[in-house]
Amino acid sequence: MKKIYTLLSISLLFFLIACSQEASEDEVVENVLSSHRDVNQYAADFTIDTSDLTRTTSYNIEVQLSEDPAALHQVSTAEADGEETSIETYRAGEEIYTQEADSPWVLREAEENEPLFSPSYREVVSVLEDVIDYAEFDSEGGTYTFHYDGFERDIYEAFEGPFNILLGGSDIADEDMALVFTFEVNKNDFYIENLEYNLSVENETGNVDINILVNYDDVNNIDDIEIPDEALEEAS
């Protein structure tokens, strides 16, 4: 009995050591930058808040999608000056059903090479690849994190395109801009869980602040996306 207890204790010790071992920074970078190859489905929540001296605008997208076969359910909400508008979208293959507020559902065919959703998970991984050399790596806590605080125009340009960040004037000096980003990576599968990006710009009209939050969930594990009967009937 004592021998069995000793063997169990040793096995448990090795198990705990194995569980406590974490990937190195190089291993995390390699895995997360290739993670998009395995991602075919996911749910995501995107929020972009923009504020300046005159107004604050909030734009939110809740999306569930499957890349192959192409299917999507998306709810987009925009709020500005106390007014809110929303658009709900379903896509199955090349057919796209859209309803704005309480209007009837409308059917259209997807345009040639029209993306399923932008920015896609693949595009977000591409952004991380472009900025990862600037980031500090941290393995403490529940996720691996890549963090940066300062300003580099290469980082600004990496986020600008995929997130459609438009600023009034392309000649804004670097010293008038500051940015912070954090990517959080799941320790088990190396998928990006969260992204936070903050950009602050000071110009002659005041300050402009842009805050972006992205949360991913249910990677490769979403329910089948089906077009509701109401949309099929109204758009037919």
Image: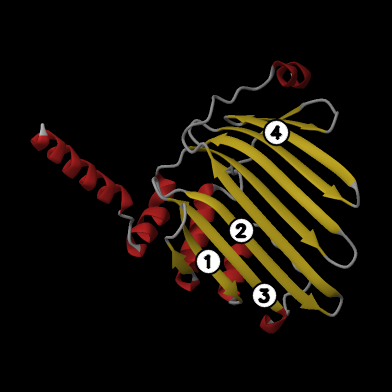
What is the x, y in percent for residue 27? 33, 59
- Mark before the other along the chain sequence, 2 or 4: 4
Mark number, residue 147 = 1
* Lateral position of residue 69 relative to residue 171, left or right: left
Q: Amino acid at mark 4?
A: Thr
The C terminus - image quarter: top right
Residue linked to disc 4: 89
- Mark before the other along the chain sequence, 3 or 2: 3
Distance between mark 2 and mark 4 Cα atoms: 25 Å
* Residue 53 in which image quadrant: bottom right
Res 42 seen here: yes
* Residue 97 in which image quadrant: top right
Residue in the picture at 67% in, 64% down: 198
Res 161 seen here: no
Distance between mark 3 and mark 2 Cα atoms: 14 Å
Mark number, residue 196 = 2
What is the x, y in percent for residue 57? 82, 55
Residue linked to disc 3: 178
Count of labels shown?
4
Circle nearer the viewer, 2 or 4: 2
* Lateral position of residue 185 relative to residue 148, left or right: left
- Mark before the other along the chain sequence, 1 or 2: 1
Figure check: 20 above or below 50: above
Circle nearer the viewer, 1 or 4: 1
